[in-house]
Amino acid sequence: MRYSFKAIVFDFDGTLVQSNQIKRDMLYVVAHTVGAADEQFAQVFSDHPRYDRFGLYRELLTRMNFSGDLDSKVDELCDLYGELTVAAISKAPEIPGAEEFLKQFSEELPMYINSATPEYSLRKTVTELGWDSYFRGIYGRPKSKNEIIERVKKETGLASDQILFVGDSLQDLESAQHNGCPFLGVAHEPGWHYAFPAGIPVLQHYRDFFTLAERSTTA
């Protein structure tokens, strides 16, 4: 089968696995270990919605007037968060049809993961799921999503418009647009808010992947 794209870059959470809510819940679970109330941590989240786990816990501890070694405590909380999320996500449901899609097409189309999750935790999670063999590269922080797209371009020798970016957030869409990649949205996880602009094709089951993907490359 011929496709108008030659490689696929996937976000991970909410794109391949229903894990967005798991990760959000675990942020609160770990915050509770230092005595934070839900309202207190929710305010940190509200004030800094784009902070990663390191930034959120640093801000929380600062507001709580933590008197110890701040860097060490932040690292400790983030390590605990990583352990809890890897264990939980390895048991989380997939986005419908995701594993069968990866299994069927990963040899035909080079596939990569481009996530904001720290790379060590990301690789561990994908391995726990038994999906690591489907991907040519599994990349996360500290590299940015734009840096990871550049890396995929170098590894594949492909132009931006030959690399399909699949993601579930406006940040994923922005990264795709910044790099000139076609974009396919994913909106499946129950209770999670999606706000893709009109005209963006959005997938809820991977059986519809190629029909929607071709729309994204002609948009």
Image (cartoon, rainbow, N blue to C red):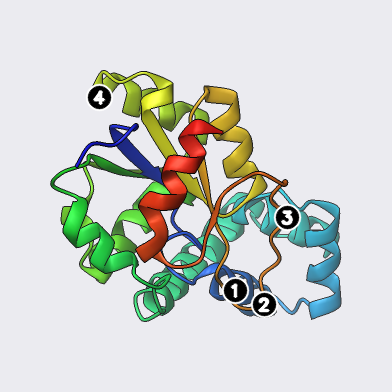
Comparing 65 with 1, the one in front is: 1
Q: Is mark 3 on a helix, strand or loop?
A: loop
110 on left or right of 149:
left
Q: Which mark is residue 155?
A: 4
Which amino acid, by three-letter code, is at mark 2?
Gly
The N terminus: image quadrant: top left
Question: What residue is shown with label 1?
Answer: 21
Q: Earlier in the sequence, mark 1 or mark 2?
A: 1
Which numbered mark, 1 or 2, is in the foreground of this view?
Answer: 2
Q: Is mark 2 on a helix, strand or loop?
A: loop
Which amino acid, by three-letter code, is at mark 3?
Ala
Q: How far apart are marks 3 and 2 (CA)?
A: 13 Å
Question: What residue is shown with label 3?
Answer: 195
- Residue 21 lies in what quarter of the image? bottom right
The x, y position of residue 183, in whole percent, is 51, 40
Cβ atoms under marks 1 and 3 closer than 8 Å: no
Which numbered mark, 4 or 2, is in the foreground of this view?
Answer: 2
Comparing 63 with 157, the one in front is: 157
The x, y position of residue 97, in whole percent, is 34, 70
Which amino acid, by three-letter code, is at mark 1?
Gln
Which amino acid, by three-letter code, is at mark 4?
Glu
Q: What element carries label 1?
A: helix
Q: Earlier in the sequence, mark 1 or mark 3?
A: 1
Q: Earlier in the sequence, mark 4 or mark 1?
A: 1
Q: Which of marks 4 and 2 is nearer the N terminus?
A: 4
Q: Earlier in the sequence, mark 3 or mark 4?
A: 4
Q: Residue, x 20% and y 67% (percent of image)?
A: 130
168 on left or right of 61:
left
Whether residue 186 is visible here, answered yes or no, is yes
Q: How far apart are marks 3 and 4 (CA)?
A: 32 Å
Q: Residue 191 carries which label?
A: 2
The C terminus: image quadrant: top right
